Image (cartoon, rainbow, N blue to C red):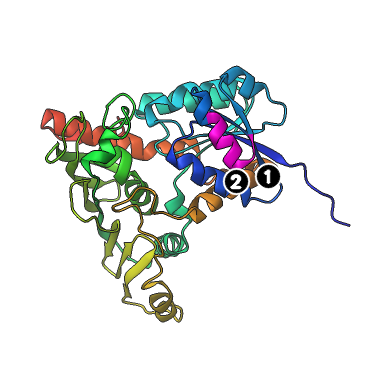
Amino acid sequence: MEVAMKKLGFGIIGLGAIADFHARAIKELKDCELVNCYHYREERAKEFAKKHGCKAYTDLDAFLADDRLDIVAIASPSGAHLEGALAAAKAKKHVIIEKPLEVTKDRCTQIIDACKEHGVKLAGIFQSRFFDSSRILKEAVEKGRFGKIVMADAQVKWYRSQAYYDSAAWRGTWALDGGGALMNQSIHAIDLLLWLVGDVSEVFAFADTLSHERIEVEDTAVAALRFNNGAMGVIEGTTSAYPGFLKRLEILGTKGSAILEEESIIAWQFEDEEPGDEEIRKAFLDSTETGGGAADPLAIGHHGHTRNFASFVKSIRENSPIDVSGLEARRSVELIEAIYRSAKSGKKIKLPL
């Protein structure tokens, strides 16, 4: 007879658009439930709680004192992640945070240190790592199928209207958005690039606001990279490219190359062909079923979030390593911070910062 596991209770801090994806993902997890939510505006808290069948709080201390709560998911504006994470860690709750972990390396480190100090687990949300196509690329890299990787590029040529930035006061601000086309929109592709190819040793970049008004941050940026393994690469990110195209990653090596377009693998060629290669080409050539957020930030699925959350729950239950740890989630923030420093100074920036 199977013994039922104790249900793990989730709560969500910050109830903007992405919180709905968190709630849907949590509902699909075995032996887990969404027990509460927190927002400083009572109307929004009650609206979200009614929609998702959980308890609404407008007092953070009361939210964290709910004895059904085990894991806090943070979905507030990026530059407000720190306060919620520190409070959750102090209350001995495990923490999972929407991208970016925070908006600077230092603020990320404060979260990492607090979770370690209070003995709770910390995970970042980078759902693109959990797509089947991404995992196939990762396996090929680890097997050395690309030979020597010589180039690795990330392209995020998306479109966001002026109305998008005007829709919330925090959007497009350094304090709460942490940046523009790179920190908000391109970070998933940048995270994949680092996960697949490794850390970057130096960057040189340009960034500017070319098409939007009333924002402090960049809507277009280009960075040239040198990876620790010697490979070179380019990151291109914009929210000004109408009508918006799916994010794209290219891994190019001396023995093979692959191109990932959102969840589709549109190129998969190796000098040493393996039996499963043709099947990969057929199965993943057109496997993207969403808009990928290219023109509409809500045109994404929640399947990646579900896998990301499930992985974290597994690590809690088994006390096993976390797939997207705080240190892992910090990597993309550090690289983007280096890119911003280069664009501002006009100088090449070496990493780590």
**348 left or right of 183?**
left
As drawn, the label of residue 26 is 2
Task: Say which quadrant the C terminus sits in.
Answer: top left
Q: Which residues are magenta?
A: 45-54
- Rendered location of residue 91, percent (x, y): 63, 21
For the question of whether residue 324 can be seen, the reply is no
> Up-down: is 187 above or below 90?
below
Q: Residue at x 89, y 57 (%)?
A: 1
Give the number of callouts. 2
Q: Dot 1: within a 10 Å radius of its alpha carbon, few (fewer than 14), some, or many (20 or more) residues?
A: some
* Amino acid type of the residue that numbered disc 1 sits on in the rendered structure: Cys
* Amino acid type of the residue that numbered disc 2 sits on in the rendered structure: Ile
For the question of whether residue 341 can be seen, the reply is yes
- Label 1, secondary structure: give it: strand
Mark 2 and mark 1: span between their CA atoms? 7 Å
Residue linked to disc 1 = 32
